[in-house]
Image (spheres, coloured by chain):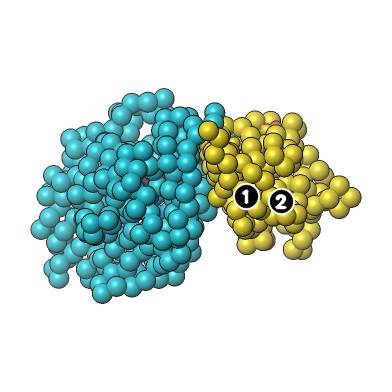
Amino acid sequence: MENTITVSVTVNGTPYQRSVDPRTLLSDFLRNDLELTGTHVGCEHGVCGACTVLLDGEAVRSCLLFAPQVDGHEIITVEGLGTLDNLHPLQEAFREAHALQCGFCTPGILTTLVPYLEENPNPTEEEIREAISGNLCRCTGYQHIIDAVKLAAEKTDP
Amino acid sequence: MKPAPFEYYAPTSVSEVLELLNEHGYDAKILAGGQSLIPMMNFRLVQPAVLVDINKIPNLSYIKTHENGIRLGAMVRHTQAERDSLIKERVPLLHETMPQIATIQIRNRGTIGGSLAHADASAELVAVTTALEARFKIQNLEGERWVPASEFFVGLLMTSLEPEDMLVEIEIPDLPARSGWSLKEVARRPHDFALIGVAAVLTLDKKDRCQSAKLVYLSAGDGPLVAEEAAVLLQGQKISEDLIIAAAEKAATEEIDPGNDIHATADFRRHLANVLTRRALAEAYQRAKGGK
Ligand SMILES: Cc1cc2nc3c(=O)[nH]c(=O)nc-3n(C[C@H](O)[C@H](O)[C@H](O)COP(=O)(O)OP(=O)(O)OC[C@H]3O[C@@H](n4cnc5c(N)ncnc54)[C@H](O)[C@@H]3O)c2cc1C
Ligand code: FES
Ligand code: FES
């Protein structure tokens, strides 16, 4: 028999309530149940970083959480960082510096870096590389990503 | 890659956890940070019928002083320990260890209790708690017991925890005066599991001779690997460069038992262990002489 559980969670400021099978991964919950497909799924075992979201403000792997675990909590996905007309400064910088090619890794990198830059507004290149060491990008060679982070840091904290 | 179905419980007290574990035995698993368990469930390497989520229990993430040391609740997360000022002051080896564990997204969820209960031989905390002679408080419906690290880790991903047991607290004693410490490891990418690593703790006597030495390796066997013969070489002696070289050689060639895999050969791991041990001992010695 299907055992289901009710999850109430705020995602990008909007409250949702859904009934789910407890084994539903948060990544699948966001993509399939809430139709927020900005969060990507690569490896489903914590290595690639594509599924990174913010749980109560902290970057976490959404493939390593079950949906019932976020009951009563607050999630921010890439869709919640900015709007189409008003991108987050880090998103602006990614566009300006060509920091994405296929874009598969981008949501996870943005959600990892947003809290990081709040705590470390002026990181060195080495620090930036370390901050995204849990996010794999197969296209860019990381160079333009680093440039974009520096650009965003300069713009927000001149 | 999706986990098999399970029944989910999120109790709010330790006693409820113990009841559930008692009732379901081998069918149940505790879910702490989930950063080791959920990958294994996604691969269906483990398929617990019952999952007991302990994240909703209040008061399992404290860090406090206790007599001659500190005590940590099992649910202290890796990033919490990394940022804690009491740990920085009282257990600097642990403070230095935390950022080396996994990437930030994993450290934001992973817990100290979970890492110890998982008992991966490549986990930094397994080696470091062994080097620091930590003790673990374990509870079940019958009562509680304290188990020293040296008896807690019993083999490949194995601990002395029984299915009805919960690890609730970790105690780390202060090091004696004139002690020094070091953790050195090599990983392919920063924060990845280390190919090999070593935690060293040295204590000097009044005449600057080595009173006690502890070398514990990670990724060098089925569990935390303690190099006992190398420690015997150091004991009672004045630390010199030659002695450090001899101890490192002994541990790396005769005592550790690293594996071969796609990331490195056993020989390469031995070579790394040799170099890292020299560096770790030199650093621990400097710190011990500095009076810390
Ligand atoms: C990509 C990746 C890289 C990583 N790199 C590293 C690394 O470099 N070094 C490192 O040390 N770790 C690494 N980890 C593992 C990480 O540190 C885990 O957080 C940790 O090993 C397990 O802690 P957890 O709280 O997530 O435990 P969980 O995954 O929740 O549980 C692990 C096991 O312990 C049991 N358990 C948990 N808590 C208790 C308790 N209180 N009492 C009894 N049993 C309990 C569970 O039932 C389960 O069997 C990595 C993980 C990933 C996914
Ligand atoms: S999909 Fe979650 S880390 Fe790869
Ligand atoms: S832009 Fe394609 S994976 Fe990073």
Q: Amino acid at mark 2?
A: Tyr
Q: Is residue B29 left or right of residue A73?
A: left
Quadrant of image for the C terminus of chain A: bottom right
SS at mark 2 in the image: strand
Colour in which chain A is shown?
yellow
Q: Name the residue rendered at 15%, 67% in the picture.
A: B205
- Lower sequence index among marks 2 and 1: 1
Residue B109: percent from left, percent from top: 50, 52
Which shade is chain B? cyan
User: Residue A7, which numbered label?
Assistant: 1
Image quadrant in which you'd find residue B140: bottom left
**In the image: residue A21, left or right of residue A89:** left
Q: Chain of mark 2?
A: A
Q: Would you say the residues marked 2 and 1 are in contact, meaning their CB atoms lie under 8 Å apart?
A: yes
Above or below residue B62? Residue B106 is above
Q: Is residue B245 left or right of residue B279?
A: left
